[in-house]
Amino acid sequence: MNKIAVLGDIDSIKGFSTIGLDIFPCENETLAKSTLKRLIAGEYGIIYITEYYASLLKKEIKKTEDQILPAIIPIPGITGNNGIGFSRLKNSVERAVGSDIIFNG
């Protein structure tokens, strides 16, 4: 059975431990990068990552895009939403259906 991890700054992710998810607090990009690599290689099927760290670790996340597992999902942190999660979802939908189905109009 695959587990669920949450990676990010402690203030953004500490609440996830109360619902049984494994949290991995990071204080800097270096720690976040090494932690993400360990989670990708481990037994985690879903990795939630704060948008702040997702923006810093784009290369590492991009390497997993064609894999089924783990699913790496950006989430807003305490600093708010910067649109990375929505952008990734939009790109995934475009790849799946062949066109942009989300438009302003």
Image (spheres, grey):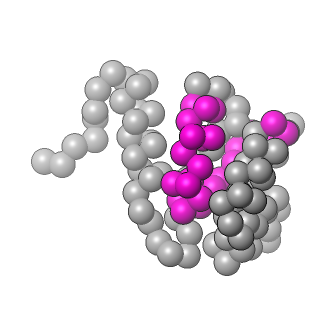
Q: Quadrant of residue 14?
A: bottom right
Q: Position of residue 47 (x, y in %)?
A: 69, 48
In the image, 79 versus 15, the foreground residue is 79
Please tell me which residue is depicted at 40% across the width and 57% down the height of the picture.
83
Q: Position of residue 2 (x, y in %)?
A: 82, 39
In the image, 65 versus 22, the foreground residue is 65
Residue 19 seen from this side: no
In the image, 65 versus 68, the foreground residue is 65
User: Extreme left residue here?
Assistant: 105
Please tell me which residue is depicted at 67% across the width and 70% down the height of the picture.
9
Please tell me which residue is depicted at 44% across the width and 66% down the height of the picture.
81
Residue 30 seen from this side: yes
Q: Is residue 55 magenta?
A: yes
Residue range in magenta is: 41-65
Q: Is residue 96 magenta?
A: no
User: Extreme front residue here?
Assistant: 30
Q: Quadrant of the N terminus?
A: top right
How many numbered marks have been drawn onto this rendered protein structure? 0
Q: Position of residue 48 (x, y in %)?
A: 65, 53
Q: Is residue 90 left or right of residue 30?
A: left
Please tell me which residue is depicted at 45% across the width and 53% down the height of the picture.
84
Q: Position of residue 3 (x, y in %)?
A: 82, 46
Q: Is residue 77 left or right of residue 39?
A: left
Q: Quadrant of residue 56?
A: bottom right
